Image: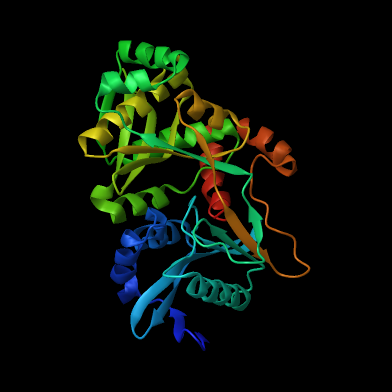
Amino acid sequence: MKEGPLLRTRIRLGELHDDARLDAYAREHPQGTPFHLAAWGRGVAAGCGQRHVALVAERGGALTGFVPLTEVHSPLFGRALVSSGFAVGGGIIADDDATAELLAEAAWDQAERRVCPTLELRGGHLPEGWARDETSYVGFTRPIAADDEAELKAIPRKQRAEVRRALGFDLEVEIGRDVATHHAVYATSVRNLGTPVFPRRMFAEVLERFGEEADILTVRHDGRAIASVLSLYWRGCVMPYWGGGTAEARTWRANDLMYFALMRHARERGCTSFDFGRSKVGTGAAAFKRNWGFEAVPLAYASRTAAGEAKREINPLSPKYRMQVALWQKLPLRVANLLGPGISRGLG
């Protein structure tokens, strides 16, 4: 597709037989994330009916970089090529900046070929001249303490009191792979926030493809699931990714127990750090994570938009969607669950 005359680097479309090789590269690269893995790219694509592709850079037959891409199409949100779809990371990774720039140009070429007016890169190498955003989102990661008591001491006093209250309630914690139960809890949570739920199949595909590198922790009260989180495990770090709770979870502080129990579970698995995930700057979610003693670190993204086209806007906090969010919160849960997957699959 493209060749750098000095570096003699060849950029080509990846194929199914490349998956294991690309996975191995991502696992070794300093900027590699679970969102670079084929398990993620192919899982979310299969779960949402989108297309996963990868651009591979090679020099003399040796792999020197790649970028996973999700081709997202939606009648509501338009078309976009995203690295990586439905993820908080997963941008270009390469041996050097020159190779990364070639991958960026090849990715833009693919966006044009696929009639996608926007190309979004989340983390990784950010190309020169592209629109950058380093102020909208922050991430939260800190070490996991040596034991439960040390973990409690690492949590600031006010939040520690909430965790202790949760530990005193008659709540059950289970670790498993029950996607149906998890999705039911998650769907209730996001409806209450005013956003459409992702398809259950996407959760199932990701969980199955990640195998032992993913699981579900659920908190129950009187047998009812009231909080649940699907987590990924990467390089000794646990990443709670899709989680939420029902209205009843507030009464029993189930979300507080859920994350504390996940820290314990991750420690038992040999993890040494806890990635609390991405939050929009200035939101209640970001404040909640700070209350746990996590420091916010800016996340850097980049995008390129075709001339004459408006940049894609999918942030539910945008004033553009204020009315839609308010209306969605009032929908009966059954209706929200019926309509939500068809809308959310186009967010990417």
User: Dividing the picture into quarters, in which one does residue 157 lie?
Assistant: top left
Using the image, determine if residue 53 lies above or below residue 27: below
Is residue 172 shown left or right of residue 317? Answer: left
Q: Does the image show residue 332? A: no
The image position of residue 202, as x and y in percent, is: 41, 52
- Of the 4 image quadrants, the one containing the C terminus is bottom right
Q: Does the image show residue 239? A: yes
The image position of residue 165, as x and y in percent, is: 37, 11
Q: Single out the residue that lies furthest toward the right.
A: 308
User: Dividing the picture into quarters, in which one does residue 74 lie?
Assistant: bottom right
Is residue 121 shown left or right of residue 307? Answer: left
User: Dividing the picture into quarters, in which one does residue 8 lie?
Assistant: bottom left
Name the colour scheme: rainbow
Is residue 234 shown left or right of residue 186? Answer: left
Using the image, determine if residue 113 lies above or below residue 88: below
The image position of residue 99, as x and y in percent, is: 48, 75
Is residue 128 shown left or right of residue 271? Answer: right
Residue for point 40% across, 60% down: 36
